[in-house]
Image (spheres, rainbow, N blue to C red):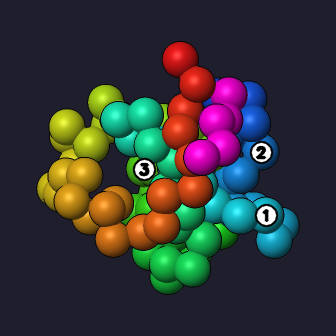
Amino acid sequence: MKEFTKEELKEHDGREGRKAYVACDGFIYDVTDSFLWKDGKHQVTHHAGEDLTNELDEAPHGIDFLKRFPVVGRLKK
């Protein structure tokens, strides 16, 4: 499984045709094909290319929502 640095994750921000990846609990999820992540944004508060581990604690849904998407790698520590 590919390992991504935080800098590499930022490159997958979902803008200008780039893939939209988000990290949570060390895993990288591909949310590119989700209409909920259009242009790399979700509900105006979350952005692709970021680690959402701490943000999901305050979201109306948890990691179960992200587990619907393909895992494409792990976030390097």
User: Does the magenta portion include 2?
Assistant: yes
Which badge, 1 or 3, is on the more N-terminal residue?
A: 1
Label 2 vs label 3, nearer the camera: 2
Label 2 element class: loop
Q: Nearer the viewer, residue 27 or 40?
A: 27
> Cβ–Cβ below 8 Å for labels 2 and 3?
no
| Residue 37 picture location, percent across and down | 51, 69
Q: Residue 11: which disc? A: 2
> Cβ–Cβ below 8 Å for labels 2 and 1?
yes
Q: Is residue 61 above or below residue 22?
A: below
Residue at the location (57% across, 80% down)?
33
Q: Work out whether residue 47 can be spotted.
A: no
Q: CA distance from mark 2 to mark 1?
A: 8 Å
| Residue 42 picture location, percent across and down | 45, 62
Q: Label 1: which residue?
A: 18
Disc 1 crowd rating (10 Å Cα; few below 14, some 14-19, many 20+) is few
The secondary structure making up most of the magenta span is: loop
Residue at the location (75% across, 36% down)?
8
Disc 3 crowd rating (10 Å Cα; few below 14, some 14-19, many 20+) is few
Image side of residue 17 versus residue 58, left or right: right
Amino acid at dot 1: Arg
Residue at the location (25% across, 52% down)?
63
Q: Residue 45: which disc? A: 3
